[in-house]
Amino acid sequence: MKVLVTAWGETPLDAIDKHVVLVDQERPVPGPGEAVVEVRACAVGWVDLLMTSGQYQHMATPPYTPGMEWSGVVDAVGEGVDLPVGARVLADGLRIGPRSHGAYRDGGFARWALAPADALLPIPDRLSFDQATCLLGNYETAWHCLVARGHVQAGETVLIHGASGSTGLAAVHLAKALGATVIATGRNPEKLEVVRQQGADHVVRSVGRFRDQVRAICPDGVDVVYDGVGGDISIESLRCVRFGARFLIVGWAATPFVAKGKGQRGAPNANVLPTNLLMMKGLDVLGCPTIISTTKDPSIRSERLGWILEAVERGAITPHIDASYPLTRVHEAMRAKWSSRHVGGCVVRPTS
């Protein structure tokens, strides 16, 4: 069994209702240099959802199987592959899957996945299949934003928006591993309590004017803003920073519809920052497109992958998985992700 996106929808919810279907799947046969993996878990990603409506900068053309990041057990290998059958592996979502380029565009919402063996990485012993699926994309994004672009230092204070999401929570974990003080924001008090338990030093509801709450914690203003939300949250953040702070633009979850839907471009829903506040605060506003930056310069990836895998081995970071669904409930899982129902990772398990 596997999932197919048969056509782009007007919105992700439209696509889920009309164009996301479950179909039978035959076990593939590996060719030279390939491996067949029995998928045990696949992350339900925000980008996977945007892709279903064609509202993402990299899009697989329907019909395709979604699921950028997955993990499983090697079931068979082709000629020239020394990967042992039974090995626990995770897929490199930049090399294969719907966001990649080349021949291997299908993702992990499937019982079986066919992949070039050199695009499969061993799962660290500490991690489960579920945790492994939520490692690379989330923590590579957080590392690129906080370290490569934000140059976060021990002792600094970082304001992290959308902290209950999978990438936001990864940023909380990583900022704490760097020695920073974390102020995490979100709208839901119950989810913020989980974020606190996951390591945030302070949590603040990002409803209305939250400046006073942040200033009560950090009177001089925060050193870094990690903004994966956009919209009004961005504007209010500018009142929370010290002079000369760094403002990291990570995404715009509050205003996701940047195109017309069904893959059509135009009618952008642009996020706008007031230049007067940028000027008076002396801010460094930094765009942090992890995938685009890595595509343009693949050499930047080696250091962050090494840092992340080493941090996992020593227990400094561990992905938090809030929910898992059998593949037969994939529509429910995708709707839950779109509505931000869960804290951290949400996965489907094709072999449940």
Image (cartoon, rainbow, N blue to C red):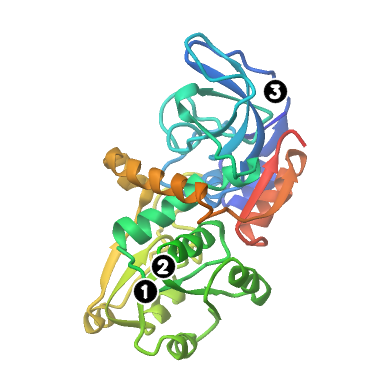
Q: In the current view of this chain or complex, which residue is farthest to the front?
A: 314
Q: Which kind of residue does numbered mark 1 sit on?
A: Gly
Q: Which kind of residue does numbered mark 3 sit on?
A: Gln
According to the picture, the residue beneath numbered tag 2 turns out to be 179
Q: What is the C-alpha distance between the residues marked 2 and 1?
A: 6 Å
- The label on residue 71 is none
Residue 7, visible in the rendered structure = no
Residue 175 at what x, y percent from top left? 43, 64
According to the picture, the residue beneath numbered tag 1 turns out to be 155
Q: Residues within 10 Å of mark 1 (few under 14, many from 20)?
A: few
Q: In the current view of this chain or complex, which residue is farthest to the top?
A: 79
Q: What is the C-alpha distance between the residues marked 2 and 3?
A: 47 Å
In front: label 3 or label 1: 1
Q: Is residue 311 above or below residue 278?
A: above
According to the picture, the residue beneath numbered tag 3 turns out to be 25
Q: Residues within 10 Å of mark 2 (few under 14, many from 20)?
A: some
Q: Left or right: 262 with respect to 265?
A: right
Residue 322 at what x, y percent from top left? 68, 57
Q: Cβ–Cβ below 8 Å for labels 2 and 1?
A: yes
